[in-house]
Amino acid sequence: MIGRFGGARFVLGIVVAWTAFGAGPGAEPPSGPPVPELIMSGLDNPRGIALGPGGALYVAEAGRGGTGPCAPVSGPGGIGCYGPTGAISRFWNGRQQRVLTGLPSSVTPVGDVVGPSDIAYDGFLGAFITIGLGSSPANRAAFGPAGKMFGTLVHAFLLGPPRIVADLAAYEESANPAGGPVDSNPFGLLVQHGARYVADAGGNSLLRVGIFGNVSTVGVLPPVAVPPPFSGDPVPTSIVRGPDGAFYVGQLTGAPFAAGSASVYRLEPGSAPTVYLTGFKTIIDLDFGPDGSLYVLEHASGPVFFGGPGRVVRVAKDGTRTFPIDGLTRPTSVLVDCKGTLYVTSHGVEMGLGEVWRLRGTNEHHHGGC
């Protein structure tokens, strides 16, 4: 259904003045203030991004779906058809390479794609990847044997064959932490020593996965006040840990995705989520910078739904809001490294047109190792 994140899939683009100079992937910007630079292109529906060993950048590609088997899904199109086209790509030492392929992906008749949603590294222990679903877990069987990986958290050691760590969709089916219709779409991912945390945007819940794959509920966001006939789903999309040790959660909100209705919540385990910052629209990702600033990625900026450009909002510790990158077309993921360099995806629902842009931090050349 449209109020769940499974129905809010993406079309992305970016317009940056640096492209006027004909810069290609990995090209160095001219001297002067930092400007965005294109470092990856040709991706299939890029979603989450993460830094891994050696400073490599990894991108979860939701893929292209395929010709089937097909199964009912939430949102426009109503039917998703399977294909092993999800992937992980890497940017390392100036080279872009697809390093893990064959992950599950589904596509609807209107081009909405679900597949790998986010990626995070646990040092040299390998990559953890959320695989979306955007449907009731009961529908997975229609995809055939390959459907069992939808709605899960998987682990790939040294980018070898992935194995299922936790069946998050099955947990939604049995526990349904937020109540309401059973629907699961694992999306945002946070990996910490001894546990992994997932924002299930379909189930409207925040989940913890222990080292043995046991799943539990960390929290549930309250509904958003919306006029009938909309459902008011909060749709959590991202979860990060702040400098104070608490969790911070961004919400897309459900239809009509009104400007100003999205908030950042602060959550301490064992306590109910509390509103930390308000006045945003369609938050799709969060990250903290090395100076303690919170970077909030807004998927769009129009009055309702997904009209208007997306943007990165930097909220300084004193509450001041600035916009390091504006004019994005429905972006999906933001990452800030220990030097203050910002990465953002674009063209997130387009096959073969996905990109990653980089905006170097002002202290990029003055840091030693992080």
Image: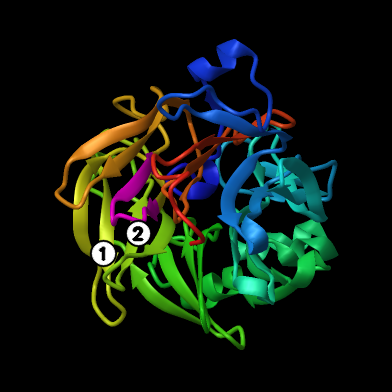
91 and 307: which is toward the camera? 91
Using the rendered image of the protein, determine whether residue 234 is visible from the camera's viewpoint: no
**Relative to 167, is 329 on the left or the right?**
left
Percent across and percent down for residue 146 are 82, 62
User: Which residues, given as a range, are shown in magenta?
Assistant: 287-297
Percent across and percent down for residue 118 are 59, 56
Tell me what residue is drawn at x 44 percent, y 30 percent.
34
Q: Which residue is mark 2?
A: 249
Which mark, by number, is residue 266?
1
**Relative to 67, is 202 on the left or the right?**
left
Image position of 227 with respect to 25: above or below: below
SS label for mark 2: strand
Q: Residue furthest top?
A: 20
SS label for mark 1: strand
184 and 52: which is toward the camera? 52
The amino acid type, in three-letter code, at marker 1 is Arg
Q: Residue furthest bottom?
A: 212
Image position of 31 with respect to 289: above or below: above
Q: Are marks 1 and 2 in contact (CB under 8 Å)?
A: yes
Image position of 292 with respect to 205: above or below: above
